[in-house]
Image: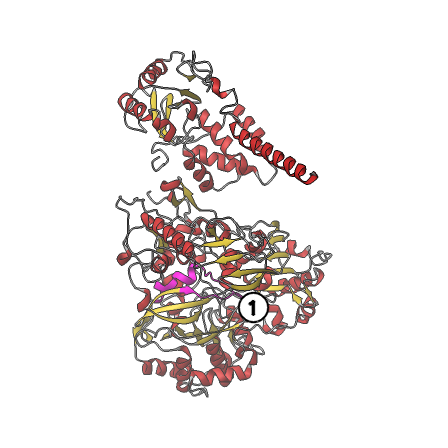
Amino acid sequence: MAVRRLAENQPESFAFTPENAAWCATQIAKYPSGRQASAVIPLLWRAQAQNAYWLPRAAIEAVAGMLAMPYIRVLEIATFYSMFNLAPVGRAHVQLCGTTPCMLRGANGLRSALVERIGPAGSTTPDGALSWVEVECLGACCNAPMVQINDDYYEDLTPASLGGLLDDLAAGRAVKKGSQTGRTSSEPEPGKGTTLTDPALYDGSRVGAWRKRFEEAEAKAAEAAAAAANDKAK
Amino acid sequence: MSKIVIDGRELDVSPDLTLLQACEQAGAEIPRFCFHERLSVAGNCRMCLVEVKGGPPKPTASCAMAVKDLRPGPAGEPPVVLTNSPMVRKARAGVMEFLLVNHPLDCPICDQGGECDLQDQAMGYGIDASRYGENKRAVEDKYIGALVKTSMNRCIHCTRCVRFSTEVAGVAELGAIGRGEDMEITTYLERAMTSELQGNLVDLCPVGALTAKPGAFKARPWELTKTDGVDVMDALGSAIRIDTRGRETVRILPRLDEAVNEEWISDKARHVVDGLRTQRLDRPYVRKDGRLAPASWAQAFAAIAAKAKGLAPARIGAIAGDLCATEEMFALKALMDLLGSPNLDCRQDGSKLHPKFGRASYLFNSTVAGIDRADAIMVVGSNPRREAPVLNARIRRRWLRGDLLAGVVGPQADLTWAYNYLGAGPESLARFVDHPPPAKAAPMLIFGAGAFARPDGEAILAMAARAATSLGVVKDGWNGFNVLHCAASRVGGFDVGFVPGEGGLDAPSMAKAGALDLLFNLGADEIDVALGAFVVYVGTHGDRGAHRADVILPGAAYVEKTGTYVNTEGRPRFAERAAFPPGDAREDWAILRALSDAIGAKLPYDTPAALRAAMRAAHPHLGAVDAVTPADGAAIVALAAAGGAPSSAPFASAVDEYHLTNPIARASATMAECAALARAPQRFAAE
């Protein structure tokens, strides 16, 4: 992640729509008085959603005003989380996970595909359709490699399937969310059924085998005790 | 108390101490960057690692682990802490290596060099050479105001500055944006900080990331001569250390004084230094044909003697300014006594406080440390944030602790602590004249100097005393009646009786046209003296007083003379001389002594020591340096009997522009820049 700064061109003002303002009030009401600042992330998130998925300076100040927080405290939060975009993004904003599990499963290939299709990280296509950044782990490691596009995860990607996905998104066609290989969430791949097919797993020779040692030891001890008791009786 | 074994030494410590504090009690030195006694614990620098038996089986950050968190051994042995084991040494060396991964090797051009925690601790606890070949990170320097210069490559992210501005200064302006390696310390969009205590960030920063902007690259700490002094920028009398090189005062730093300023000083106290170099009066002047012309001392004294000859004593007067040492006022009062004139006053702001009402009526009786004990504070006619920023920080700390009933009558300002606003003028104070006392053990009333510096000041004072009586703030072992002065010399002036004698004129009357023929002005620059009188100005700067003067006698500023200053608590403090006055300028006591000789009323003091001894003989409590001699609270009760109806004009703070309250500050380019920023706080660095 690079150093994050507010965008150069900023709108003059920002105001929540009446519906969003009402929603914000419900969020703020969740917290006891004097602790309104706890609502800062939901409010920033909603402000970003209202403003084409990026946070202008005016929105940061508006949220700070609503929660009686110093501006710098809200700016700290907006710059800390990569979920907040500080500059305009494409209509489909791709966040590529580049952390170890995804990297091992081919995230570097996805990155090359994105650079080729959109440009270097942080750039937007001239038509404003696509943009991308690299982020840290998004927590979908079992479906690596993956990207997040706007609010949804797209998983089990290859450079080719990501390319098709971007084409569809840029053209405004409907796309399939989640795994792109037909897996249901993180279940095994279709046709593979269960991966645990080795019968040895179920006959006690491997699973639970550790217990046998102790059972044998216990039996031996019991035998010895019985033998000792017999000797005494004699 | 709990037992703990530190480096093989068993000792009994309070269970609330952190391991770091316990180790210090045991005499073990623990290196640290982020930990600071007066700030919250962050625990992010990891430099204070120690080995603990009875805690987690890994090096433990001793600043963030309390003694009570440790468990005894299986047989009940006390927990064991090792501060110098091989494991600890290795852990510290590792932490230091990580800190230095991104720290530039620019010590030769860094202003912190020589007083840098990182330098010292790298020598003490680091390894000898770098194993790191990669590029260091580069961070943009930030603009955060006129007083603090940033070199953000050097930042080690201890967050002391963020915690200081949020917790102590009470203005949450600094923050850490970004995260991880990209974390950066900045103000919001690089706006200038607005706190009056921001200069302390430079002392707090353990590395050279935040250094003083005024005086950058001018001096190295080891080439400076350090002298203990007393700050005169406000009436708190903060303990300062004056660093000089040759004749030049280079910088001013705070000294630790738990009773008054702890380890902070205000920006004005710290950065007024360049005002000591500019606009200085370095030779006598005599007005000829309407213009001030340079003269010799002999010519100046001859001009005064010619004027003074044959004048009736009632036509001679003296006004003392806000920065005078007590000795000078004592000497000038003695001179006026010899001349037989009752016209003398140290209250150039027109204050109606007067020693005749008793010493308790003009002191901060609770003492500054008493703020920590207070459970109710009402501020009347004052903006303590501007009048005494360090004292205000103390009130804020008390407020942060909770359970404080706080109220303000007078100007409504952002004081960095929350209060109930009770009204603007005397009518709001009148509500408390017959008010049942609050159920509080240590209530405090703090009256600003501005509350009494008005024509109806005596009536206000009587009303204040009545309110104090009805609210029960004066009781056994506690006197909650407090006056917060703005002038460093004021309490000293009252203590030596530098107020009009029987039938004498006060300062505003003396300044009126035709009141006097000869006026001695001892550094009073906040009063307009009308044309007519022959004014002899003894002072340091070409300010208002010098412009009006007919004879200027150049004096010494506060760092250039020894002197006693009595702070608003009534605590006499003694300042050593750190530098010499410029050019032909002389110490004020010597000027007064020579002047007295010239006009035929010779003062009997030939050395400052003799003058001081005479002053202490006349006023013994001034000899008890650094001790507060408590005043009798009965004076407040007696004062309550006085009558008078105050006008309905709202209270105003005595300080309008914080950075420009005295001639030294007005001569300072740094203070002028700060004042301009304070007037337009929203201005951006880049615009």
Q: Residue at x 43, y 24 (%)?
A: A142
Of the 4 image quadrants, the one containing the N terminus of chain B is: bottom right
Residue flagged by tag 1: what amino acid is it?
Glu
Q: Is residue B569 magenta?
A: no
Pick the residue in front: B240 or B331: B240
- Residue B570, placed above or below residue A109: below
Q: Quadrant of residue A8?
A: top left
Residue pointed to by mark 1: B569
Q: Residue A213, how many percent across, how many down?
A: 53, 31
Q: Residue B503, how many percent across, how many down?
A: 58, 77
Local SS, label 1: loop
Of the 4 image quadrants, the one containing the C terminus of chain B is: top left
Pick the residue in front: B470 or A82: A82
Q: Which residues are magenta?
A: B253-276
Q: Quadrant of residue A52?
A: top left
Pick the residue in front: B656 or B507: B656
- Residue B173, placed above or below residue A204: below
How many numbered marks have been drawn onto this rendered protein structure?
Answer: 1
- Residue A108, placed above or below residue B194: above
Q: Residue B568, how many percent across, how many down?
A: 54, 67
- Is residue B506 at all visible to an observer of this figure? yes
Q: Residue B360, how many percent across, how many down?
A: 62, 70
Crowdedness near tag 1: few (<14), some (14–19) or many (≥20) residues, C-alpha within 10 Å: many
Q: Residue at x 41, y 36 (%)?
A: A79
Visual colour scheme? secondary structure
Pick the residue in front: B43 or B2: B2
- Is residue B384 at all visible to an observer of this figure? no
On the rendered structure, is A4 left or right of A66? left
On the rendered structure, is A112 left or right of B434? left
Instruction: Tell which subunit mark 1 falls on.
Output: B
